[in-house]
Amino acid sequence: MNVQRTNIISVTSVIKGVIAAAALCLLFLSAISVVPTTAIAHGGLEHVMGVVQKISPTSVMVSTTDGKTTEVLFDQKTTYAKSGHPVQGSDIKVGDRVVIHAAKSGDKLIARTVEARTAK
Ligand SMILES: [Zn+2]
């Protein structure tokens, strides 16, 4: 009983330390590794996950985990974060790992949020 209580408390404090959106994505990422699926969307947004291959002020090319390259466009509403902190688009570099939530507009993807992590 005591051991279980301790575990619950530490898990709660870890979750509190992570912003809600990032926590959701972590859960989502762990779900993907268990259940492979190509139709990935939640909150009405597409997920694009992978490594930045090329980035400009208007778009990013991401090489995704399934071996494809996907272009995602930026607009004025796009927000950027790196290691959990808000940044400018110019702070996202080639080689960074990214999780992008993008809205579909015709055959284009428009980034709503771009979350990056520096390549290790
Ligand atoms: Zn997500």
Image: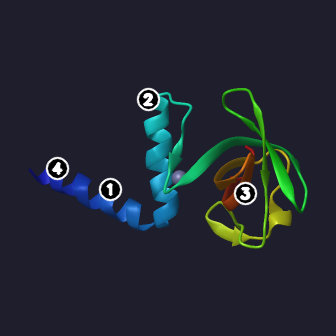
In the displayed structure image, the side of residue 13 where residue 93 appears, left or right: right
Q: Is residue 85 above or below residue 104?
A: below
**Residues under labels 2 and 4: Cα distance?**
28 Å
The residue under label 3 is 110
The residue under label 1 is 11
Q: Is residue 89 above or below residue 40?
A: below
Q: Of discs 4 and 3, which sits in the foreground?
A: 3
- Quick one: SS at disc 1? helix
Front residue (pair 42, 83):
42
How many other residues sit within 10 Å of disc 4, few (<14), some (14-19) or many (≥20)? few
**Residue 58 appears at what percent x and percent y?**
87, 60
**Residue 2 appears at what percent x and percent y?**
12, 53
N-terminal of the two: label 4 or label 3? 4
Residue type marked 1 = Val
| Residue at figure coordinates x 40%, y 67% from the top left | 16
Q: Of discs 3 and 1, which sits in the foreground?
A: 3
Tag 1 and tag 2, C-beta contact below 8 Å? no
The residue under label 4 is 4
**Residues under labels 1 and 2: Cα distance?**
23 Å
Q: In which quadrant of the rendered image does the C terminus lie?
A: top right
In the displayed structure image, the side of residue 5 where residue 49 appears, left or right: right
Residue type marked 3 = Ile
The tag on residue 51 is: none
**Residues under labels 4 and 1: Cα distance?**
11 Å
| Residue at figure coordinates x 89%, y 62% from the top left | 57
User: For residue 17, which quarter of the picture?
Assistant: bottom left
- Quick one: SS at disc 3? strand
**Residue 76 appears at what percent x and percent y?**
77, 73
In this rendering, does residue 118 appear at all?
no
Residue type marked 4 = Gln
Front residue (pair 19, 10):
19
- Quick one: SS at disc 4? helix
